[in-house]
Image (tube, rainbow, N blue to C red):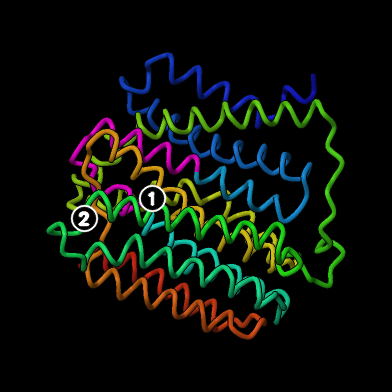
């Protein structure tokens, strides 16, 4: 009975009740309540995915968390594209680009900064970081850069054969990364900290807790998608009302999706488990692009919907700066407070130049 009274159980149920009541469409007060429940439902989904992850141990835990977040991202993007049609052609690009910038500059930057403030210097595996960054750079170029320069279709679009090739390339690269993380080079991704908390041992999870979390993970994911789709017109109206670029919708979606993961990564860095933080960040960035783009591309091909992927030159330069800075920051296997500050400045530049292009 006590387990059923946990907030991670109650919040998704309340969210479903509010959604089916129809009150969200009729009152701004209920839209605010729905927004709060949306964020709490994301937190609930991550909580349940963490319990499932504890059952299977590391590094599978960070993989499950990253894939759970990506399922939310894919579901929201696809549902909005199906409802808005060609007007949402750039939504996948905007959301994936925003998520990548938030992860590389925001999450990694905060982890390096907070970890360095608390522990002065932290160690991590350069081998795991190199594997992650090599995979990420290739996927980024295939999905967000090449479409701007290809000639088969005018504009920031791939032709259907090119889109299929890029999607297959993403899946192959992400699959090889998962193989390295779980089988071939698993030792590179295990935490190598000095604290007792840094030791990664699976916690005993009984069958009742495991299956409850599995069920409520699905329930939480479902209501997150429905509430996000319901609230998106209000978000767009507010953004347009303040004469802000519509691409901010993708940033807001990315922030909502990545919030719990950012908290988990920062907590790990404070506990001197920077390796876990980097596993979460780079794994999420890879899953965000490597799974989202092929999923959205498949729907667009089947439904004959346009999907704009290529970034403009300014965004490409900012993305290249972010990747290059992260590569240099993580090249020595030791954290530094300066690295964190520089990455956060990159993040502020991304946000500032989006509002003031």
Picture coordinates of residue 38, whole percent (x, y): 48, 35
**Label 1 neighbourhood size at 10 Å, few (<14), some (14-19), many (20+)?**
many
Q: Is residue 167 above or below residue 150?
A: above
Which residue is tagged 2?
157
Main secondary structure along the magenta-highlighted residues: helix
**What's the residue at 73%, 63% (across, down)?**
186
**What's the residue at 65%, 26% (across, down)?**
215
C-alpha span from label 2 to label 1:
13 Å
Most foreground residue, 338 or 136: 136
Q: Is residue 304 magenta?
A: no
Q: Quadrant of the C terminus?
A: bottom left
The answer to whether residue 241 is seen in the rendering is yes
**What's the residue at 84%, 45% (across, down)?**
203
Q: Quadrant of the N terminus?
A: top right
Instruction: Report which quarter residue 197 is drawn in.
Output: bottom right
| Extent of the magenta region | 71-95
Mark 2 or mark 1, which has the lower sequence index? 2
């Amino acid at each position: 009975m006590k387990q059923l009274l946990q907030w991670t159980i109650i919040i998704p149920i309340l969210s479903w009740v509010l959604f089916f009541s129809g009150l969200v469409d009729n009152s701004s007060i209920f839209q605010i309540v729905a927004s709060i429940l949306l964020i709490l439902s994301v937190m609930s989904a991550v909580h349940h995915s963490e319990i499932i992850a504890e059952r299977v141990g590391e590094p599978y835990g960070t993989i499950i968390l990253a894939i759970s977040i990506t399922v939310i991202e894919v579901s929201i993007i696809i549902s909005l594209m199906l409802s808005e049609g060609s007007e949402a052609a750039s939504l996948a690009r905007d959301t994936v680009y925003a998520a990548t910038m938030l992860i590389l500059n925001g999450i990694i930057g905060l982890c390096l900064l907070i970890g360095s403030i608390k522990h002065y210097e932290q160690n991590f595996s350069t081998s795991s970081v190199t594997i992650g960054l090599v995979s990420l750079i290739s996927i980024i170029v295939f999905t967000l850069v090449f479409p701007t320069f290809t000639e088969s279709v005018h504009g920031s679009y791939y032709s259907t054969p090119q889109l299929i090739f890029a999607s297959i390339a993403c899946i192959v690269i992400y699959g090889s990364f998962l193989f390295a993380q779980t089988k071939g080079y698993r030792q590179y991704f295990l935490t190598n900290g000095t604290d007792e908390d840094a030791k990664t041992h699976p916690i005993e999870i009984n069958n009742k807790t495991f299956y409850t979390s599995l069920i409520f993970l699905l329930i939480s994911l479902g209501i997150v998608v429905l509430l996000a789709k319901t609230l998106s017109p209000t978000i767009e109206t507010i953004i347009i009302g303040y004469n802000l670029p519509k691409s901010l919708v993708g940033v807001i979606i990315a922030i909502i999706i990545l919030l719990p993961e950012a908290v988990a990564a920062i907590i790990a860095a404070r506990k001197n488990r920077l390796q876990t933080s980097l596993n979460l960040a780079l794994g999420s960035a890879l899953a965000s692009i490597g799974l989202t783009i092929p999923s959205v591309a498949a729907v667009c091909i089947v439904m004959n919907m346009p999907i704009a992927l290529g970034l403009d030159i300014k965004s490409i330069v900012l993305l290249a700066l972010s990747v290059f800075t992260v590569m240099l920051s993580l090249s020595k296997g030791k954290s530094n407070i300066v690295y964190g500050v520089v990455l956060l400045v990159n993040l502020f530049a991304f946000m500032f130049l989006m509002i003031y292009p």
